Amino acid sequence: MRGLDSPRNGPKLGWSRVGGISQTRRVFGVLIRIDSVTKRYPDGTVAVDRLSLDIPDRSITVLVGPSGCGKTTTLRMINRMVEPSEGTILIDGVDSRQQSVNTLRRGMGYVIQNAGLFQHRTVVDNIATVPRMLGWSKDKARARARELMERVGLDASFAKRYPYQLSGGQQQRVGVARALAADPPVLLMDEPFSAVDPVVRKGLQDELLRLQAELGKTIVFVTHDIDEAVKLGTMVAVLRTGGRLAQFAPPAELLSDPADAFVEDFLGADRGIRRLSFFSSGGLDLLTAPVVAVDATAEQIACRAASDVPYLLVTGLDGRPLGWSEPGALTAGRVDVGQLLPYGRPFVAGKDSLRAALDCAVLSPTGWAVAVDAEGRAAGVVSQTAIGEAIRGAHAHASAHAASVDPKAATR
Amino acid sequence: MNVINFVSSFFGESAHWHGYDGIPTRLWEHVQYSLEALVLAAAIGLPIGLLTGHYGRGGNVLSLVATAGRALPTFGLLVVTTIALGFGMLPVMVPLIVLAVPPILVTTYEAMRSVDPPPVDAARGMGMSESGIMLRVELPAALPLILGGLRSAAIQIVSTATIAAYVSLGGLGRYIVDGLYQHDYEKVVGGATLVAGMALATLGLFWALGRAAVSPGVRRSN
Ligand SMILES: Nc1ncnc2c1ncn2[C@@H]1O[C@H](COP(=O)(O)OP(=O)(O)OP(=O)(O)O)[C@@H](O)[C@H]1O
Ligand SMILES: [Mg+2]
């Protein structure tokens, strides 16, 4: 643990994202301390107003808020692309103005919206830029660049291409690789994924979470998309127009206890549903009685139909679900797979969240969700009612838990 | 007599290919004057254009100077510099440079201003020095336009370097000036043809330069 350890601000994660990067509670040190910083532009605009934030070590801190609320300004004050008018920014306990701007910036990767690649350089040479600046030999810098291409999921065949020969998503990967090239402890990212389509964006987000878990960087991530903030953030800072901090909390806490009407509004109408992504489906009681194999005997079918479930889930010989059927419509030895009701998209028991489970149940024609194991074999079925009960239980558990930990954990 | 006849008889005359007034000599002199003027003009125009373009300052002053430079009549300037400085290379170079600096300066400035801002922002954000940004990020991106400015300057120089002959120097202008004086129109047309040919060769040279110096990533993304 490096940096200042602040008992006042050390964010404590009450629970972590299901299926996310960590299942353990962690207490972070502070790497970047923004201390009552104000930015007044020459034309008088106050973009950031007495902002104080402690950005924890080795985690993703997301700055989110409506357009013009000062997110970019805040981010750019960290690497001094914008100089604060008042206040100080401490990096690892040291005033950021104590070193030269270029030294400071070389220790912080910087990723911008459209990647900002150098059109005249190939992919490897784009990525090798900072190592070259730091005086590495060309060969060493290129070898490092190739290593990073692999890390960010770019095929080696792209190495000699020019940026115009890449898609937007690929360019963004190059941008991330370029920022990581000299292995800086800090990564500053300004809406890096906002210019790509939703599918590519999801891929890039998953990749970032994976990279973060592998490399343990301190990432400051700007977005105006609350879903992205909740998905990526270890901590989320919500800014309001005028550059003031509205709330600084882990995403689950943000969703359960928005500080005020502004934050609640900003989180949108479905924050209750979104919050479910923080609860594991592991606690659900899965019923196996209504699951019947496609080669079941008449006796087995009859016995299963006796259980008070309106539908039976038919599985293949490999255990994978095939579809739903009414008990009466099943005849042993002559199951017509084409006649089965679709089972929708199953959730992975224990790994997926209650949100995924609920989604499956809502989408299922029978109102029952199908749970599968990691190999895709049916693990059981669960009704909407049972999921609803689990949700109420999880909420009760979470609020009891939050009260017992630290009532003002990480909220300032 | 038509122009084609003039041209063929000028180039067919073997005497025109030898001696101090022969085509190779005059052509070489012309190349030397032009190259010298272009190098000097670029030495003035490029750095000023790069710096003002990079820092985005002095654009107004620049266009004022450039307009003034363009407004000066080259031939008048030649007369003035010759009176002031006597005969020699210098009085010829001054008007050629005054002619060539504005296009180089203005296009370089404009080219640097029109570079896509995100890569520059990214470069600054990763801690690149200002000179590094100017020379390794902006210049390669602006190069096609800058070469265009140099090319038009070069062509103007090539066609205007004929004025050297008015002040007793050599070059292809010799044929034109002497031919007019001697009413030898074959010589005039021959000289003019050579100048035009050299202008075309200059175009070709810059095309090749563009192929060699501009990164394929910039060339094809435009
Ligand atoms: N160079 C500048 N001069 C004057 N005002 C500026 C300057 N840069 C930004 N601002 C103003 O400061 C405020 C905050 O800008 P900033 O770019 O930080 O917002 P943002 O939260 O990143 O917005 P967006 O989501 O639209 O990117 C805005 O009102 C903006 O108009
Ligand atoms: Mg912004």
Image (cartoon, rainbow, N blue to C red):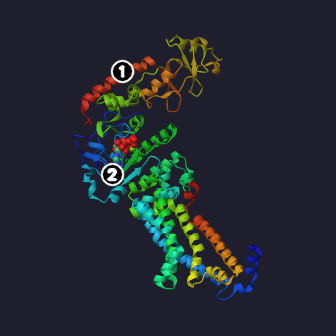
Looking at numbered disc 2 in the image, what kind of residue is underneath it? Val
| Residue farthest along the bottom direction in this orientation | B19
Which chain is indicated by disc 1? A
Q: Is residue B69 above or below residue A204?
A: below
Q: Residue at x 44, y 61 (%)?
A: B53
* Beta carbon at label 1 within 8 Å of ligand 1: no
Q: Residue at x 70, y 84 (%)?
A: B17
Q: Which residue is mark 2?
A: A82
* Beta carbon at label 2 within 8 Å of ligand 1: yes
| Residue B105 location (% of width, % of height) | 48, 66
* Residue A392, numbered circle: 1
Q: Residue at x 53, y 73 (%)?
A: B74
Mark positioned earlier in the residue sequence (1 or 2): 2
Q: Foreground residue, A12 or A307?
A: A12
Looking at numbered disc 1 in the image, what kind of residue is underneath it? Arg
| Residue A157 location (% of width, % of height) | 57, 53
Q: Foreground residue, B199 or A289?
A: B199
Q: Is residue A261 above or below residue B212?
A: above
| Residue B211: quadrant of the picture | bottom right
In the rendered image, residues at marks 1 and 2 fall on the same chain: yes
Q: Give neighbour class at mark 1: few <14, some 14-19, many 20+ (Cα, 10 Å).
A: few
